[in-house]
Amino acid sequence: MAVMEQVNQFEGVDERTLEANSRVQFTESTNVILTVMSGTAQLNGYIPLMNTSIFIGNLGLRMELKNDSDQPFVYRIYRFQQYKLRNRQDLQLTYELSKEYVNYNGLVYHKSSNKVRKVSEALYQANKENEQSHLLYKLLFTIEEEFELQKSQLTEVTFQSVLDYVSINSHEPLKRDEVANHFGYHQNYFSKLIKAETGWSFSDYLAHIRLDKAKVMLLDPRYTITEVSRKIGYQDALYFSRKFRKQTGLTPTEFRLFKGQKRIFSFQFTGDLLAAGIQPVGTLNSPGNIPPHFVEQLGDAFLVPREDYPTFEQLRALELDLIVAPSYLYTHPKLIEELEKIAPVFILKWDRWDRLEETKTIAKLLGREEEAANWIARYEEKVARGQELLKPLIEAGETVGVFELRENNQVGIWRSSARGAYNIYKKLKLKAPKSIEEDILTPHKHLVIDEYLISSYAADHMLVIVHTAEQALRLKESKYWEAVRTKYHSKVYILQLEDFWASEGIFLEHQLDIQVKKLAEGDYIL
């Protein structure tokens, strides 16, 4: 007789409604499966939930749902326990309660199938114990089967989610132990983990997040220093001012007057600086920062070789007024600390902002609002011309998508902040396929899929970015892409990564020119 290594026990299910513009907190004493019936919400401050989302959480997990929409959020909570075989002796089997069914803080799945929804509905309706037990096993098996088939669509909540939570909620009176408990960590282990992941203690990491947010808020003259202090999480404005001066070398008031600085080094956002009429005295010579097409525009600027960082001696020699850097440098705390000794450092979230707001923010810091406004007006005129040009060429209802070939036979599908997708979805307002809208644009998350799944995201017009000539050949010869072209009649256009790696400021305008030209001229694979 086969012995079951684990046993799942169904404990119940209920349907709940979270009214519009409200939130709720709760903790279940069992493992849970959360399914969405209608509406949208955010779970624990950073996980988007929509109509096809499924969340699986461990027993005792504290959950907070927030509904910012004007429609109710309707969801179901399925409760179950799992018992694992602990001891087998003669004919007696001993099982014990398993406290961790999934990753410590859960699994989120954003594209459940009709099969999952049918089984979950059957379990909701079932009222007999043996039927409930059978359907629970079937539901868990079906979900796990889909996870295996679509691993690339599975988001496992990792420590990055903890850092995202701290960043999003940094204005709250966050305490290390409370955050550790919220995510199910022992306090001492959490301290070691955040030090290993960021190089900073929890308090130092939180302080850097808060002060970098303060730099952006100080650009808005409507806020007093006291208001900025409170909005970022410090109730004592004097304490905030001391912390700010220690990090930047400037008081908050002096930072507000920090206009017209000309000796700038940029680790990122170079396209925004150029859009505001500012040429940095130094920058990274990498396609991820500046496309090769624009390098000549930098004149005699100090260009750091590709895939390299400048030395501190090189930066000191430039006699800098300001260093502009992206938030991904938070993973290099020692670098940031050394940079702060050389010049004030302005750190912005990378790949998260609206592209034009990003340009405006940098321009405001440097007193170049008028120049940025002129560039934005020029860009918007090009957008309008592009819309008129494409209107008779892209039929009503036709869809457009932005893709990128990756290594290992995978394909990236980008949210609107990357690879020029902002032009397509936000400005030209071309329609994305429903699958891209639901899986990428609505949750605002990039997605990397195995190439054989590309037909699930096929668009009538597919702008595909390639890294190399070999990839361009793969695009033409792959049976999966051939099926997209023949079965779905998709038009596949080839774009080059070096033109689309960085999408800031004037680079976005250059990408718009390329995209409109490709679509207007019908320059697709035949």
Image (cartoon, rainbow, N blue to C red):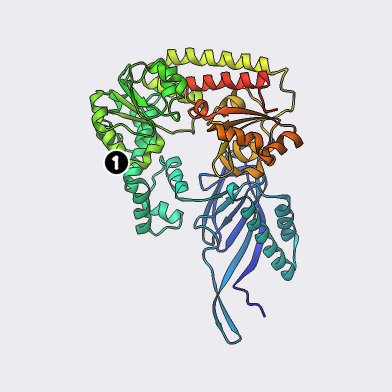
Q: Compared to 78, does 83 lie above or below?
A: below
Q: Which residue is more in the foreground, 120 or 73? A: 120
Estimate the x, y position of residue 405 in percent, counting from the top left: 57, 37
Horizontally, residue 154 falls left or right of residue 175, namely: right
Query: Left or right: where does residue 495 sit relative to residue 370?
Result: right
Quick one: SS at disc 1? helix
> Given the current orientation, which residue lies at the most extreme bottom position?
90
The residue that mark 1 highlights is: 334
Residue 297 falls in which quadrant of the image?
Answer: top left
Q: Residue at x 41, y 38 (%)?
A: 328
Q: Is residue 358 left or right of residue 484?
A: left
Q: Quadrant of the C terminus?
A: top right
Which quadrant of the view contains residue 41? Answer: top right
Image coordinates of residue 350 in percent, x first then y, are 45, 33
> Is 166 in front, or is 297?
297
Q: Is residue 251 above or below residue 122?
A: above
Q: Residue at x 58, y 50 (%)?
A: 108
Quadrant of the rendered structure where residue 425 is? top right
Q: Amino acid at mark 1?
A: Lys
Do we see residue 95 in this rendering? yes
The front one of 96 and 405 is 405
